[in-house]
Every structure is written in structure tokens, then in C-alpha cells.
Image: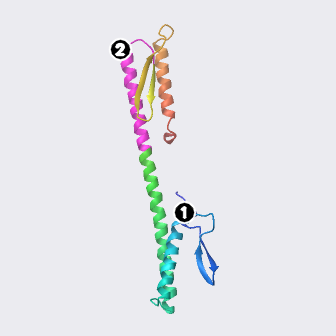
Amino acid sequence: MATIDLTTLTTGNVQLIDKKYKWVIPSGSTAGVLDEIIMFVNDNIELQYDNGRIDDDKYAEIYLSALQTTISQGMQFLLQKQMLEAQISGIETDNEIKLLQKAATNIEVLAKKLTLESDFPVDVTVNYDSGEVGSVTSVDTTRLGKVERLVRLEEAKVRLSKVPSVLK
């Protein structure tokens, strides 16, 4: 279950300043989504009240309605932001998996070609960023046999399977 860091919603609080209660952000803190919207709504309601567009009887009703809407919209924004971040992370993970699958396939194809075409052991390097087989280098053929070559290829597969922590 996803958690919401409330500091991304609000770090502000109400303080009495010049005989008026104001929504303020403590020094050293960053305003959250709700803080920004509340300060805007508060300033706008105060302006409308000062200009006589809102009378005393309706002030509390308008303020509470605006506050409820502000909180609702702030929470909606944060939840959509978290959902988008999760979707992006999933897409990035899928792309990593596809690259690793492509690299594994390339290694298997190369291993089969080498087994069919040659009795020479080889070292294979893979570029994990692109999934392409980077280089193939022959090693000392007098000391390594076909079994040892297959062991090296299996070790390469094991190393490849351990690369992405997202697959664990």
C-alpha cells in the first residue's frame, strides 16, 4: 500500500500575525501542495471580503467550502502524482527486463553458433545498457576444452540473471 508523505501535502500552520490569523510555512520548510493552494484561497477570500463582495454572514460558509475543496484537490493531486510515478517506474522496469531478455537471447544465440562452428572457448561481454553482445575474444585453447567453455557460458547466464534487482 502506498503511503503519502504529508510534508508533500502541507508543512504550514496557522499563526497570529498583526492581529490576524495567517497560514504560514515555517522557515527552512518547503511549502506543500495544500499550502500553496490555501495561501492563494485565503488571500482571495480576504480580498473579496475587504472589497465587500462577501458579507459577514456568508464568510464562514464560503471559507469552509473553499477549505474543503482545497484539501480535496490537494489530496487528489498527490495521489495522481504517486500513481504517475508508479506507472513510470513500472515502464522503466519493463524496459530493463526487455533489454536483459534481449541480452540473454543474444548470448544464447552466440553460444549455439560457437558450439556449432568452433571448438574454441571464448569470453563473451554484454552491454547491459543496450542488450547487445559487445565482444567475443578467443582464449587459450590448449588448456580449455569444450566443457569449460560451456561452464563459462553458464556462469555468464547466472551473472546476467542477478543483474536486475527488480527481477528478484
Locate residue 86, reporting x and y percent.
46, 53
Res 84 → quadrant = bottom left
Tell me the SS state at disc 1.
helix
Secondary structure mainly formed by the magenta segment: helix
Q: Which amino acid does label 2 sit on?
A: Glu
Q: Name the residue under label 1.
A: 8
**What is the residue that sits farthest to the top in this orientation?**
142
Mark closer to the observer (2, 1): 1
Q: Is residue 101 magenta?
A: yes
Residue at 48% x, 24% y: name it.
154
Q: Which region shows up in magenta? A: 93-122
Q: Which amino acid does label 1 sit on?
A: Thr
Give the spatial CA distance, label 2 vs label 1: 60 Å
Q: Is residue 139 above or below residue 105?
A: above
In the foreground, 11 or 160: 11
Locate residue 128, reporting x and y percent.
45, 33
Identify the mark at residue 117; answer none if there is no mark. 2
Res 131 → quadrant = top left
Locate residue 98, reporting x and y percent.
40, 38
Q: Is residue 48 magenta?
A: no
Locate residue 144, reporting x and y percent.
49, 11
